[in-house]
Image: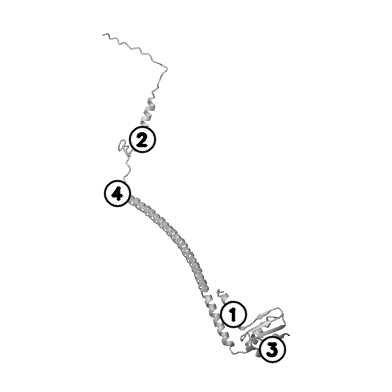
């Protein structure tokens, strides 16, 4: 082998180049180390002796008592905050409960009022129906009783009049007087009476005329076909039956009409 070292021939592309800056790389490494390395201090004695190379300064660790105090303060604060939250929650719950109670009371009050009004309305309607029913019952009862009452009254009136006029001669004059007072447009009368009443009526003719308060002509005629207290008044254009029996009959008919019997 030859002692001559043969060099390889290498061809480079000079257009592609890269600059390696070793100084920049060193600075970056130092910076990284400064970030990673703990805080270093140099303690230099008066005689210039360095107490330690690259001595690490460790911050003083709190004592156990101080740690307990700090922990106690943190716990107390946490408890106070928790208690405050609890109290606030209780207050909110109480407020919600009061609002719910108030709403419930108002709802119950409104429902009570509505129910009371409904019951009152129902009672009013019941009373109206009951009143109408009672009025109808009363009306029906009157319809049933009125004819009976009218019949009873008519009978009583007839009996009372019979008793009152029995053996009374002045009844005929009274009947004639009442009839003539309602006939003011006539002044000339012929009055037919029974044989029983003729003498008394004729004797009291002047008294009858005086009671009328006006000038009239009156003539009594005895009629044997008439009964006691029967009286027929004749004018030039009309005939009036004012007999006691006829008047009782008319009164009875009126009572029956009122009683719904006719």
Circle 4 — which element? helix
User: Which numbered tag is attached to residue 249?
Assistant: 1
Of all residues, the one furthest to the right in this rendering is 215
Q: Which mark is residue 205?
A: 3
To which residue does mark 4 refer? Answer: 64
* Relative vertical location of residue 41 with respect to residue 157 in this rendering, above or below: above
Are circles 1 and 3 on residues that touch, CB within 8 Å? no
**Distance CA(mark 2)–CA(mark 4):** 31 Å
Closer to viewer: mark 4 or mark 3: 3
Which comes before the other along the chain, label 2 or label 1? 2
Residue 35 bears which disc, if any?
2
> In terms of sequence position, does the residue under pointer 3 or pointer 2 come before the other?
2
What kind of element bears circle 1? helix
Q: CA distance from mark 4 to mark 1?
A: 135 Å
* Disc nearer the start of the sequence (4/3): 4
Q: Is 72 positioned to the left or the right of 250 in the image?
A: left
Q: Quadrant of residue 6?
A: top left
Q: Position of residue 53 (x, y in %)?
A: 31, 35
Residue 75: horizontal and vertical position, in percent?
34, 51
Q: Quadrant of residue 173?
A: bottom right
Cα distance between the residues tagged 3 and 2: 164 Å
């Amino acid at each position: 082998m030859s002692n001559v070292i043969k060099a390889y021939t290498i061809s480079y592309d000079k257009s592609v180049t890269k600059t390696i800056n070793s100084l920049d790389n060193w600075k970056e490494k130092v910076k990284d180390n400064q970030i990673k390395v703990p805080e270093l201090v140099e303690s230099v004695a008066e005689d210039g002796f360095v107490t330690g190379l690259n001595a690490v300064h460790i911050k003083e660790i709190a004592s156990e008592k101080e740690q307990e105090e700090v922990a106690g303060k943190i716990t107390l604060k946490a408890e106070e905050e928790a208690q405050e939250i609890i109290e606030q929650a209780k207050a909110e719950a109480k407020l919600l409960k009061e609002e719910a109670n108030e709403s419930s009371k108002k709802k119950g009050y409104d429902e009570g009022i509505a129910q009371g009004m409904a019951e009152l309305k129902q009672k009013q309607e019941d009373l109206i129906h009951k009143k109408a029913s009672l009025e109808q019952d009363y009306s029906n009862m009157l319809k049933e009783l009125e004819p009976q009452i009218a019949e009873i009254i008519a009978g009583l009136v007839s009996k009372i009049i019979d008793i009152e006029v029995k053996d009374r001669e002045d009844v005929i004059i009274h009947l004639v007087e009442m009839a003539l007072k309602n006939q003011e447009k006539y002044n000339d009368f012929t009055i037919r009476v029974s044989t029983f009443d003729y003498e008394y009526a004729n004797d009291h003719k002047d008294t009858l005329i005086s009671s009328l308060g006006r000038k009239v002509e009156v003539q009594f005629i005895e009629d044997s076909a008439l009964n006691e207290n029967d009286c027929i008044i004749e004018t030039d254009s009309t005939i009036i039956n004012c007999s006691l029996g006829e008047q009782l009959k008319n009164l009875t008919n009126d009572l029956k009409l009122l009683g719904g019997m006719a």
